Image: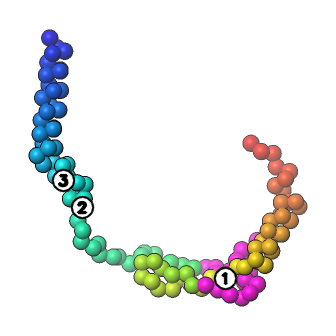
Amino acid sequence: MTMRRIVSLTSRCSSSAYRLCRFGGFPSWGRGIGSRFSTSAAVEEPISPSVNIENTQLLIDGAFVDAASGKTFSTIDPRTGEIIAHVAEGNQEDVNRAVLAARRAFDNGPWPKMIPY
């Protein structure tokens, strides 16, 4: 008897839910998910705190250095299109310096002597 009541209740609920969904009883069901969201543009608030750029150089061998070529490139804020900073533009020579420094640090540093966990 109890089982019959439960089955009866669940069948009523599912058929009611189907009718609500089918005929637009719920705000977004049956009309696509986009109908719940506004298409108006949000008001942009200024970023707080503002961006603070401390270093624009390359980090090689534990020190910040300028690019060998002296070239830089602009870093642009995607929200405003404004230039945030001019950053050192590394080239092949800079990459080679960084790789050699990393090799020295590995060969002469504590890393190879460490025990893996």
List x then y, in percent, for residue 44. Answer: 33, 76
Q: Which mark is residue 17?
A: none
Which residue in the structure is indicated by mark 3? Answer: 31
Task: Specify the quadrant that holds the N terminus.
Answer: top left
What residue type is disc 1 on? Ala
Which residue in the structure is indicated by mark 2? Answer: 37
Q: 71 and 24: which one is in front?
A: 24
Q: Nearer the viewer, mark 3 or mark 1?
A: 3
Verify whether residue 66 appears in magenta: yes
Q: 45 and 23: which one is in front?
A: 23
- Residue at 72%, 79% (x, y): give it: 91
Q: Residue furthest top?
A: 1
Q: Nearer the viewer, mark 3 or mark 2?
A: 3
> Chief secondary structure of the magenta span?
loop
What residue type is disc 3 on? Arg
Q: Quadrant of residue 13?
A: top left
Measure the C-alpha gap from mark 3 to mark 1. Answer: 52 Å
Q: Quadrant of residue 41?
A: bottom left
Measure the C-alpha gap from mark 2 to mark 1. Answer: 43 Å
CA neighbours of label 2 inside 10 A, class few (<14), some (14 to 19), many (20+): few
What residue type is disc 2 on? Phe
Residue 37 drawn above or below residue 91: above
**Mark 2, secondary structure of its residue:** loop
List x then y, in percent, for residue 79. Answer: 42, 78
Residue 17 drawn above or below residue 51: above
> Which residues are drawn in magenta?
54-73
Q: Tell whether label 1 touches label 2 (CB within 8 Å).
A: no
Which residue in the structure is indicated by mark 1? Answer: 88
